């Protein structure tokens, strides 16, 4: 039986390792467990898989056309079963294009690895065919459980951050994890000369006042109108140490300033209370507020994804609810 | 100058998992719209057209959408906003279509429409064959959220790609006295509001992030103009290439597991407001 290689592409920004890399390793371990389970069933052999973490050096990963071209020969040489990258701005920029160059399967935004019950164990030596992947669809409202038609091909996955964690039991896998540095040279590609990568601008303030607030009252598109931000402010005024915030679309529409955006491209907050009104709960928003101590959500849609992350769920029209809340404060 | 904007029509109503558990059904309030990020891409194309017009450069905007019969409404809306021509590739595929399939279909159509040969062959560096100077897509669709179609299409056409674009600049190019139809300067967004400056030679593909602009409403004069124009219609078989089978399959759909209790409050609006108030008081969050 061949050893299966799961390739983790470590993510760097400004020469610093991004924490998503740990989550990629945790996900690789999940895949390993499935391989090993199957291998045991077939032959009683353990550990038929290895996890290779590669650190590509001497090239700026933000120069994505160059980065893609440099990854192709490295991946061909390693010939992995799976490639894992982050579902981050870098991963989104690189992964899909890379999969076309490699002619491989590509599943983006994976949040869970699934080993289906109905698999006919032992029939095929290739356990990869039996692995399924969960990824969010429809603003995070449901997960599509996806499989690949040609498991013999490489499968490239981008991993949703916040989905996999290194746990204590991961230690026993340390012996199958190896780290390797690569210094690509002579990267050759016709598109590279067509694109010129400039500097990085930290133009928007990265510090947010939201970090000091004990209570955050946040609105999403469900609030309906810019004028209704006033209701939001009135609701926030019911609490001490409170601040008003919003989902990205509200900032994009100019209803609230950027400093008040919560989410992956805004502020990451964890107040005592996060009150979300008219927010659907997309993964990019959830990433910014899921560690709040207590979460209350108001949404007219009983299946809104935000409820999966809430302590209290209120299915209501948000304006009527805010009005009722304000009216019933003594 | 020619710009192509790829748009997708999506359901905006509340959706539920259907009885088979394999896909979703749209709620009673079923309504359809252009996916938001695509609408930003479209608006950006129109803004480019307007700004180029001031410089005496004419821009032609084509819209392409692969979708069911109803997608024609979205194409008409796009033309009402200011796009010039519409291309509709009709398919009744309703479920999950992976990015690779859509990108290859778009590439096949672009090739067919322009009759440019070889643009799908990789490695031949035939980028000059791309009939468009600029191709814009949304960063992802709001329904399938794959963020794949743009970057994959760029690969099939062998043109450079920049994702998550939040700004397209002009003035610098003007000062440089260079040909603005040759190279554009863009900013892409990373996590935490960090931006990367990039100059890219045309033809190129950009995937557009929300916040770059405020999409306009269709204007009456544009709607009237659009009504007079015919949308170029194709059948999905026209977009099929030899290897366009879907590499992915959806086995089922599930509601995500609850990470917290999600205690549901009952009663009238007022009941719920009072109950919430009491809960928050108990927890010392409200005085
Ligand atoms: C790379 C990238 C980065 C991103 N970064 C962020 C980020 O940092 N932060 C962020 O928030 N988003 C971010 N987004 C956008 C994200 O994908 C979603 O589009 C966004 O979070 C949705 O905002 P929303 O919930 O306000 O709007 P929608 O998704 O439109 O949800 C509106 C909700 O309001 C409900 N509603 C409607 N009317 C009412 C009513 N009358 N009463 C009660 N409820 C009602 C609806 O049921 C729905 O659930 C990012 C996207 C990308 C691609």
Image (cartoon, coloured by chain):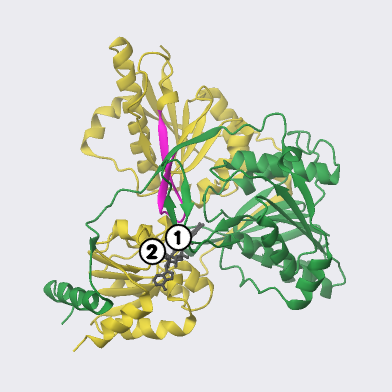
Task: Using the image, determine if residue B11 lies above or below residue B98.
Answer: below
Picture coordinates of residue B157, whole percent (x, y): 73, 42
Chain A: what color?
yellow
Quadrant for residue B217, please give it.
Answer: bottom right
Identify the magenta region. A131-145
Res. A59 visible in picture: no
Task: Using the image, determine if residue A96 lies above or below residue B222.
Answer: above
Q: Residue at x 43, y 83 (%)?
A: A228
Q: Are marks 1 and 2 in contact (CB under 8 Å)?
A: yes
Mark 2 CB lies closer than 8 A to ligand 1: yes
Res. A260 visible in picture: yes
Quadrant for residue B107, please give it.
Answer: top right
SS majority, magenta: strand
In this view, the residue in front, B286 or A327, is A327
Q: Please rate how many residues cluster around mark 1, counting C-alpha atoms within 10 Å: few if below 14, some from 14 to 19, many from 20.
A: some
The residue at which mark 1 appears reads as B14
The residue at which mark 2 appears reads as A301
Task: Using the image, determine if residue B252 lies above or below residue A226.
Answer: above
Q: Residue at x 60, y 31 (%)?
A: A102
Picture coordinates of residue B129, whole percent (x, y): 83, 43
Give SS at disc 1: loop
Q: Tell whether A153 sits left or right of B259.
A: right
Residue at the limit of the structure toward the bottom, as seen here: A330
In this view, the residue in front, B210 or A167, is B210
Picture coordinates of residue B155, whole percent (x, y): 68, 41
Q: Quadrant of ligand 1?
A: bottom left
């Amino acid at each position: 039986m061949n050893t299966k290689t799961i390739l983790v592409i470590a993510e760097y920004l400004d020469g610093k390792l991004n924490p998503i890399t740990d989550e990629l390793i945790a996900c690789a371990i999940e895949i390993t467990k499935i391989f090993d389970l199957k291998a045991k069933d077939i032959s009683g052999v353990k550990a038929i898989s290895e996890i290779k973490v590669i650190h590509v050096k001497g090239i700026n990963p933000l120069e994505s056309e160059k980065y893609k071209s440099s990854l192709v020969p490295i991946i061909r040489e390693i010939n992995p079963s799976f490639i894992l990258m982050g579902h981050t701005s870098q991963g989104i920029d690189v992964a899909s294009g890379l999969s076309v160059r490699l002619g491989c399967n590509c599943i983006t935004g994976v949040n869970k690895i699934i080993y289906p019950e109905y698999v006919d164990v032992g029939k095929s030596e290739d356990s990869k065919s039996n692995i399924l992947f969960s990824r969010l669809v429809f603003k995070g409202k449901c997960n599509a459980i996806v499989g690949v038609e040609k498991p013999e091909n490489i499968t490239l996955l981008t991993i949703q951050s916040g989905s996999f964690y290194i746990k204590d039991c991961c230690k026993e896998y340390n012996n199958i994890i190896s780290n390797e540095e690569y210094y690509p040279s002579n990267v050759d590609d016709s598109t590279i000369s067509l694109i010129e990568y400039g500097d990085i601008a930290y133009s928007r303030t990265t510090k947010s006042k939201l970090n000091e607030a004990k209570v955050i009252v946040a609105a999403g598109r469900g609030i309906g109108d810019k004028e209704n931000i006033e209701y939001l402010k009135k609701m926030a005024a019911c609490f001490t140490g409170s601040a008003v915030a919003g989902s990205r679309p509200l900032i994009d529409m100019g209803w609230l300033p950027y400093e008040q955006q919560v989410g992956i491209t805004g502020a990451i907050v964890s107040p005592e209370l996060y009150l979300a009104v008219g927010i659907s709960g997309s993964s990019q928003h959830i990433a910014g507020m899921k560690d709040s101590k207590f979460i209350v959500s108001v949404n007219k849609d009983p299946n809104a994804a935000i409820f999966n992350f809430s302590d209290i769920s209120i299915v209501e029209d948000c304006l009527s609810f805010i009005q009722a809340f304000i009216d019933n404060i003594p | 100058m020619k710009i192509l904007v790829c748009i997708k029509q999506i359901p905006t109503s509340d959706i539920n998992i259907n009885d088979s558990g394999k896909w979703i059904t749209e709620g009673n309030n079923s309504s359809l719209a252009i996916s938001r990020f695509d609408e930003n891409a479209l608006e950006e194309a129109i803004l480019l057209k307007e700004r180029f017009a001031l410089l005496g450069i004419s821009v032609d905007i084509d819209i392409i959408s692969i979708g069911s019969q109803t997608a024609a409404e979205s194409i008409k809306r796009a033309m009402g906003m200011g796009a010039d021509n519409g291309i509709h590739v009709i398919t009744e595929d309703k479920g999950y279509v992976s990015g690779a399939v859509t990108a290859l279909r778009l590439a096949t159509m672009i090739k067919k429409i322009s009759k440019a040969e070889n643009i799908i062959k990789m490695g031949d560096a035939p980028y000059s064959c791309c009939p468009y100077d600029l191709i814009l897509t949304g960063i992802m669709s709001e329904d399938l959220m794959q963020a794949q179609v743009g970057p994959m299409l760029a690969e099939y056409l062998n043109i450079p790609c920049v994702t998550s674009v939040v700004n397209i600049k002009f003035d610098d190019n003007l000062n440089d006295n260079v040909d603005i139809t040759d190279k554009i300067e863009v900013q892409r967004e990373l996590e935490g509001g960090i931006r990367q400056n990039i100059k890219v030679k045309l033809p190129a593909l950009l995937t557009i992030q929300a916040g770059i602009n405020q999409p306009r409403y269709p204007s009456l004069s544009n709607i009237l103009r659009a009504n007079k124009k015919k949308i170029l219609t194709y059948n999905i078989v026209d977009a099929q290439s030899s290897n366009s089978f879907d590499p992915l399959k959806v086995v089922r759909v599930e509601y995500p597991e609850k990470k917290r209790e999600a205690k549901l409050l009952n009663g009238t609006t007022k009941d719920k407001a009072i109950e919430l108030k009491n809960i928050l008081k108990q927890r010392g969050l409200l005085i």
